Amino acid sequence: MRPRFFAGRPFVPGETVPLAPDEVRHVRVRRLLDGSVVELLDGQGRTGRGPLGGGGTNVLVEEVEANVGEPAARWTVALAAAEPARVEWAVEKGTECGAAGFLLWIASRSQKAFVTSLEGRLPRLRKVALEAAKQCGRSVVPGVDGPVAFRDLVARRPSFTAVPGTPAWAPARGSGAQAGGLIVIGPEGGLADEERTALEAAGSISFGLGPRVLRMETAVVASLVTFSIG
């Protein structure tokens, strides 16, 4: 895989795109020379290719390709606010597994300290998603938003909710579910009964991930694989 850098904006063939200071440092750490062919991401699905120039400060885009490394289905993960280190791991690995985005939500069992911490860590989580997208060969950088209240999550009418102990389920070939939607992952300790009831009333289908109880971050990966995103 060619070295990959983030442009942070759209570009077109023939354009010389300046690199941000963080990306210039990455060029220098990699000891790349002018003329080295690299890839450039706009974060929205376009991948450019072309040589470095300007002493490693810009890229001349010679060709552009759309949706490199992107799955056909677009699934957003609604992730309950939990220990920040676990959320960070979930965002990193979920990005590698093809998540279209992440929505943090406040469960009744979410600790207030974790919610407060995550509110201040959104820039860090977005950077984790960016670096994971660059590393794994994707062309879309998933967004990370929230934390939102439970009522706001329900209002978005989630498609599926991971619930331990319920039967495994996967979308049948040709079903509309394959196009994507919103998958809810609960907190450590699981969803409260009233949360599960409200989600089901909003049309969310409960599904299981096997006979074992998975940690939240593991459930993110398992859910994405279950819905054939990887």
Image (tube, rainbow, N blue to C red):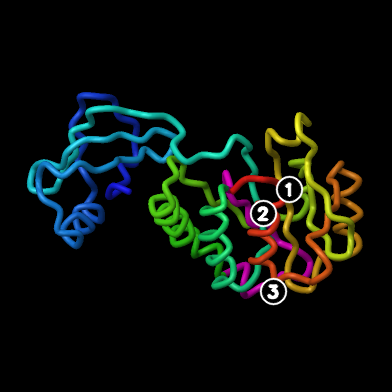
| Vertical arrangement, residue 111 with respect to residue 138, above or below | below
Q: Position of residue 39 (x, y in %)?
A: 29, 41
Q: Find disc 1 in the rendering and name its residue.
A: 152
Q: Is residue 111 magenta?
A: yes
Q: Is residue 11 magenta?
A: no
- Whichever of labels 3 and 2 marks the residue nearer the N terminus, that label is 3
* Magenta segment: 99-116
- Say which mark, if any, is on residue 148: 2
**Residue at 80 percent of width and 68 percent of height:** 190
| Vertical arrangement, residue 98 with respect to residue 114, above or below | above
Q: Find disc 3 in the rendering and name its residue.
A: 111
Q: CA distance from mark 1 to mark 2?
A: 6 Å
Badge 2 marks a residue whose secondary structure is strand
Circle 3: residue type? Gln
| Vertical arrangement, residue 160 with respect to residue 195, above or below | above
Circle 1: residue type? Asp
**Residue at 91 percent of width and 63 percent of height:** 193
Badge 3 marks a residue whose secondary structure is loop
Q: Dot 2 surroundings within 10 Å: few (below 14), some, or many (20 or more)?
A: some
Badge 1 marks a residue whose secondary structure is helix
Count every numbered label the image shows and give the total. Answer: 3
Q: Nearer the viewer, residue 69 or 117?
A: 69
Q: Quadrant of residue 204?
A: top right
Locate residue 79 relative to residue 60 in the image: left or right: right
Q: CA distance from mark 3 to mark 2?
A: 14 Å
